[in-house]
Structures are given as C-alpha cells and as structure tokens.
Amino acid sequence: MTDDRRPTESEAESRIMLAALYRILEDARRYEEYAEVAQRAYDNELVDFFGELREETRGLAERAGKLLAQRLADGGVQ
C-alpha cells in the first residue's frame, strides 16, 4: 500500500480477483450440494445439470486462480 494507506490499483485488482475466486468456489460447492439433493430424489436430469454447472464453475475457478497468481507474481497484494 502507499503511505496514505489507500490500496494501489494492482492491490485492488488482486483483492477483486481473490473475492471473485472465493465466490466462484462457493458456487461450485453449492452446485455439488444441489446435485446431491437431486441424486437422493433420483432425478438424473438435475444431477447431470448441476454436475455440468459444477464443472463449468470449477473451470472458472481455475482460470480465476491463474489470473490471481499472475497478478500476485507481478506485485499485487503484498
């Protein structure tokens, strides 16, 4: 941070990416829970749907993690 305690632009970007990654991972966990409920109800169509959402979301989480790592390596949040 700068001396006036305001985050720099790169620190702000890194924090935004960290928050986004956290939310994306929460979504993936939620979709897993929904799939489990659908499985207990023997609704294979919903199991597949929520499974697809979970996998797509995990892909987004991986991408967000890479973007965050890139920014941290470039001097983001310190």
Image (cartoon, rainbow, N blue to C red):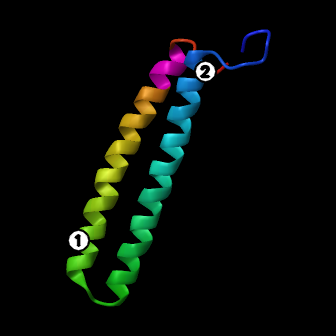
Q: Quadrant of the N terminus?
A: top right
**Extreme left residue here?**
45
Identify the residue under disc 1: 48
Res 15 → quadrant: top right
Q: Nearer the viewer, residue 10 or 42?
A: 10
Residue at horizontal 25%, vertical 61%?
52
Q: Is residue 19 visible?
A: yes
For this view, does 1 lie left or right of residue 42? right
Q: Position of residue 69 (x, y in %)?
A: 48, 25
The answer, for residue 76, to whether it is visible in the render is: no
- Identified by mark 2, the residue type is Glu
**Horizontal and vertical percent position of residue 53:** 30, 60
Q: Which residue is mark 2?
A: 11
In terms of sequence position, does the residue under pointer 1 or pointer 2 come before the other? 2
Q: Predominant secondary structure in magenta?
A: helix
Q: Picture coordinates of residue 3 (x, y %)?
A: 79, 9
